[in-house]
Image (cartoon, helix red, strand yellow):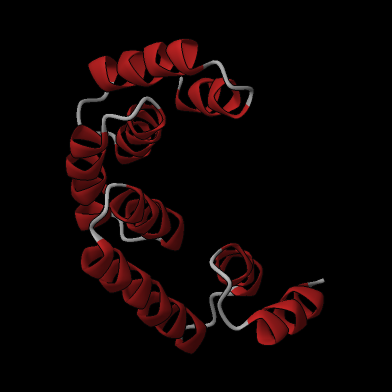
C-alpha cells in the first residue's frame, strides 16, 4: 500500500497517494514509511505543521537520510531556517556514520548536496564514483 502511495505521489496524484498511505496506516498503525509518505502529501498541500509533526515522528523512529532531508526541506519551506539547518547537519552526521559502517550513500547524499547547492564539485565527483 505504501508503494502504491509512492507511485501515485510521484505521478502527482496526491489524493490517491494519501488514501493509500492512510490505508497502510489503518492496517499497520505507525508504519514509518506510510507516515513519511503521508507527510509529503500534507506538505505538498501546504499543511506544513502536520507534515513536520508526522515527519519528526518518522525520523525519531527511522532517521534515514531521505526522511531527514524531507523534514529539513519542509522546515525550510515553512520558514524555520535554523531548524532546517539542524536537520541538514544531521544528514551529514548520518552519512558519516553510514560510511564508517560500510553503508554506501554517496549517490543519495550527492543528490541532496546538488539539490541544496552545497559542495557541488564534490557532489558531482561522488555521483560519478557511485556509478
Residue found at x 32% / y 74%: 90
Q: Nearer the viewer, residue 42 or 36?
A: 42
Quarter holding residue 60: bottom left
Q: Nearer the viewer, residue 92 or 63?
A: 92
Residue found at x 17% / y 42%: 53
Return the x and y of residue 59 as percentages of the image width and height: 26, 54
Return the x and y of residue 86 as percentages of the image width and height: 26, 72
Quarter holding residue 121: bottom right
Residue found at x 26% / y 53%: 79
- 94 sits to left or right of 32: right
- 23 sits to left or right of 117: left
User: Where the C terminus falls, by quadrant?
Assistant: bottom right
- 53 sits to left or right of 113: left
Q: Please, is residue 109 above or below residue 126 in the view?
A: above
Return the x and y of residue 104 as percentages of the image width and height: 60, 74
Quarter holding residue 55: top left
Q: Please, is residue 13 above or below residue 106 in the view?
A: above
Return the x and y of residue 97 as percentages of the image width and height: 40, 83
Q: Number of callouts in the render?
A: 0
Residue found at x 32% / y 28%: 42
Q: Nearer the viewer, residue 98 or 90?
A: 90
Amino acid at each position: 500500500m505504501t508503494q502504491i502511495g509512492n507511485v501515485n505521489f510521484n505521478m502527482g496524484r496526491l489524493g490517491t497517494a494519501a488514501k493509500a498511505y492512510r490505508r497502510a496506516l489503518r492496517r499497520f498503525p505507525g508504519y514509518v514509511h506510510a507516515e513519511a509518505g503521508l507527510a509529503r502529501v500534507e506538505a505538498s498541500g501546504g499543511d506544513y505543521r502536520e507534515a513536520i509533526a508526522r515527519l519528526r515522528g518518522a525520523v525519531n523512529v527511522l532517521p534515514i537520510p531521505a526522511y531527514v532531508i524531507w523534514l529539513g526541506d519542509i522546515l525550510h519551506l515553512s520558514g524555520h531556517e535554523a531548524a532546517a539547518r539542524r536537520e541538514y547537519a544531521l544528514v551529514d552526521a548520518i552519512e558519516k556514520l553510514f560510511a564508517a559502517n560500510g553503508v554506501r550513500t554517496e549517490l543519495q547524499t550527492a543528490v541532496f548536496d546538488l539539490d541544496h547547492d552545497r559542495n557541488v564539485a564534490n557532489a558531482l565527483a561522488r555521483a560519478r564514483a557511485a556509478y
